[in-house]
Every structure is written in C-alpha cells, then in structure tokens.
Amino acid sequence: DRAAFQKVFALLRAHEVPVPDFEVWFGAYRNLFRGMIDLSRQTHREANFEQVLRWLLIRFAVPIEGKVSFRELVELFYGEYHSCRRVYPEVPSTLQRLQSMNVRMGVISNTTNPSFIKEAERKASGLDSYFDFALYSSDLPYRKPHPSIFELALARLQYEPAEVLFVGDQPRMDILGAQGVGMRAAWINRRGDALPDGVKPDYTFTTLDGLLEIHVG
C-alpha cells in the first residue's frame, strides 16, 4: 500500500494542497489502519479505509475542498493497489459453464474497500455478468465468518442453506462460516496448505474448475 499512498500524496501535491511529511502521514495511516484490521479480526466488524483516510485529512489539516474530490483520492489509491491483481486462467470458463447450467452465483467478500471500488474491479475483470449479487463487508455490520453475512446471501437467493455451496479459500472465515449456517462448503486450496484443526470442507479442489466435478441439480 506504500506505492498507492505515494500516488495519493503526489496528486495532492500536484493540486498544491498543503501536505505533511510523507513518512509521518504514511506512518499514521499504517498504525491506525492496522489497528482497525487487528480489531476487526476479533469483533468481526470490518475496518473501513474511507474512515481512515477522512481521519488523516482532518488530523493533518489537509484541505482538499475545491481542489480534488475525496472519491478521486480513494479511486487513485485502489487503482494502484489493485493494479497487480489477475484472474486465474480457469475462472472465466468455469463461471461460464456453471452459468450455462443455470447455477445462480453471488459474491460474499471481506473487504475494507468501498463497494464502488469492488464493483469497478469486478467489471474490469470481466466477471460481473456471472453474478446475481455481491455482498461486501465494508457495507455491512459484520464480516465473515459472522453468520449474518451468509444469512443475507441466503435471503438474496431465497434458498435453504443445504441447497447452497459456498466456495472460498480461507478455511476459518469461508469454510467454517458457511458451514455454521448450514451451507456446504468447497475449499479452493491452490497452494497445498494444511487445514487447521477442526475444519472439514465438504469438497477440496486445487483450482476452481474442480467445481465442475460436482453434480449440480
């Protein structure tokens, strides 16, 4: 996130906005945001990047009004932060195949990003058309593995828990969270990691196209 923050800093300077020393500002950001993230792991309440950035602008008296919009700063930060992300090669064809089988799909994501950033990322990836809905923890009271975010997905789908297969790569947040509300769960284990004690996925695959091995319907 250092390179992303440098982009924000450079934009402010380009607009002749008075800014503090970069290392001081970045250090304050790191300390606050990491503290919020650590707390979120205990409370399941999501950390919020926008809150941190607003606090920094106020704390260091950085006057952006009339020079650059807050949303522009957020978009610039995440544009750089997400620039190295790529879609795994088997993902588009797998989603296309599942969609052709009339499998309804949605997204449940733990993220500190605002939803408009995640929506833009989803569209840029070319995957948006495969999903009926997307739920982001940054918009909700709780993050995975809290049951409420899974229950909201069930309400959107109007399915019973046993009719839903949740797919994720995080054993505790994804697998235990989904199974805790009665869903089945598939673990995508690309790196060959060992499962933590007490976690038993219904299915385990090394790539997403393993889902096509499951009889659907």
Image (tube, rainbow, N blue to C red):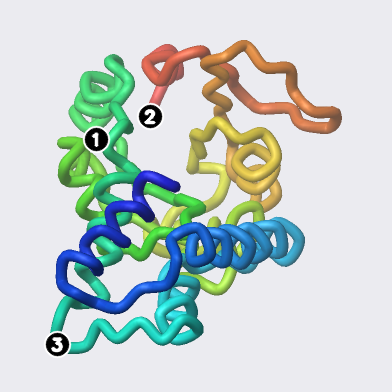
Marked residue nearer the N-terminal end (2 or 1):
1
User: Element under label 2?
Assistant: loop
Q: Residue at x 57, y 26 (%)?
A: 187
Q: Residues within 10 Å of mark 2 (few under 14, many from 20)?
A: few
Q: Amino acid at mark 3?
A: Gly
Marked residue nearer the N-terminal end (1 or 3):
3
Work out whether 102 lies above or below 6: above
Mark 2 in CB contact with mark 1 (< 8 angstroms): yes
- Name the residue tied to disc 1: 102
- Name the residue tied to disc 3: 66
User: Element under label 3?
Assistant: loop
Distance between the alpha carbons at the discs numbered 1 and 3: 49 Å
User: Of circles 1 and 3, which is in front?
Assistant: 3
Rendering coords of residue 124 (x, y %): 16, 42
Rendering coords of residue 30 (x, y %): 57, 58
Work out whether 190 lies above or below 196: above
